[in-house]
Image (tube, rainbow, N blue to C red):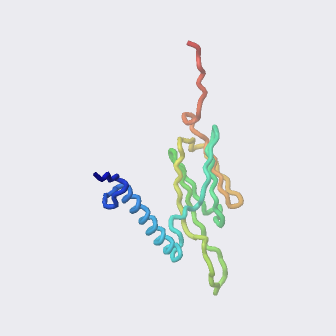
């Protein structure tokens, strides 16, 4: 009598192993296509302006990097729990008969909507633009602030 174990039969279909092999093949395919494409076309989906969002007990802070953008070209609007930063980065004047060897800084209009985790007071939002950094300070709404609960003895 011969005993054959499942792991020893090469002709047995193993669906989980087959799915793993298929996933590896798809990863290789996408890697080849994306690396070939990245040489031809600038990377899509760049987000401008890049931001850092922090908070403390009373405020949210949005710091946006906007090199090359002028103050008069920035537009900020707020509504409910969302801040929209818009504007335009205009092309720099480099003179006539200039040939670019590389051009990585994108120019043109931009718009970025940032949703915060809770409400803020839209009447008290403050924005300061200095050295290419936009700092937006948003005071949290009273109902969004954490409050201390006093524990009583029973």
Residue at image point 64% right, 84% down: 98
Residue at image point 60% right, 55% down: 51
- In this view, the residue in front, 118 or 42, is 42
Q: Quadrant of the C terminus?
A: top right
The x, y position of residue 6, in whole percent, is 34, 53
Residue 149, image quadrant: top right
Question: In the rendered picture of this protein, how many numbered marks are placed on residues?
Answer: 0
Residue at image point 59% right, 60% down: 49
The relative height of residue 44 versus residue 85 in the rendered view (above or below) is: below
> Position of 23 compared to 51: left or right?
left
- In this view, the residue in front, 80 or 24, is 24
Residue 11, image quadrant: bottom left
> Position of 1 compared to 88: left or right?
left
> Position of 29 compared to 124: left or right?
left
Residue at image point 32% right, 51% down: 3
The x, y position of residue 119, in whole percent, is 53, 41
- In this view, the residue in front, 152 or 127, is 152
Q: Residue furthest right?
A: 131
Q: Residue furthest bottom?
A: 97
The x, y position of residue 5, in whole percent, is 34, 52
Q: Residue furthest front?
A: 1
The relative height of residue 76 versus residue 89 in the rendered view (above or below) is: above
Q: Residue furthest left?
A: 1
The x, y position of residue 111, in whole percent, is 53, 60
């Amino acid at each position: 009598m011969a005993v054959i174990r499942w792991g020893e039969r090469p002709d047995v279909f193993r669906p989980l192993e087959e799915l793993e092999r298929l996933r590896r093949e798809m990863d290789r395919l996408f890697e080849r296509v994306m690396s070939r494409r990245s040489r031809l076309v600038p990377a899509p989906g760049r987000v401008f302006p890049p931001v850092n969002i922090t908070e403390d007990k009373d405020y949210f802070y949005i710091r946006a990097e906007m090199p090359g953008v002028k103050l008069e070209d920035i537009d900020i609007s707020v509504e409910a729990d969302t801040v929209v930063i818009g504007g335009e980065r205009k092309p720099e004047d480099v003179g006539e008969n200039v040939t670019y060897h590389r051009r990585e800084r994108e120019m043109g209009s931009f718009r970025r909507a940032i949703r915060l985790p809770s409400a803020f007071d839209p009447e008290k939002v403050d924005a300061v633009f200095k050295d290419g950094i936009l700092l937006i300070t948003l005071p949290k709404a009273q109902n969004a602030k954490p409050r201390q609960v006093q524990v009583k003895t029973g």
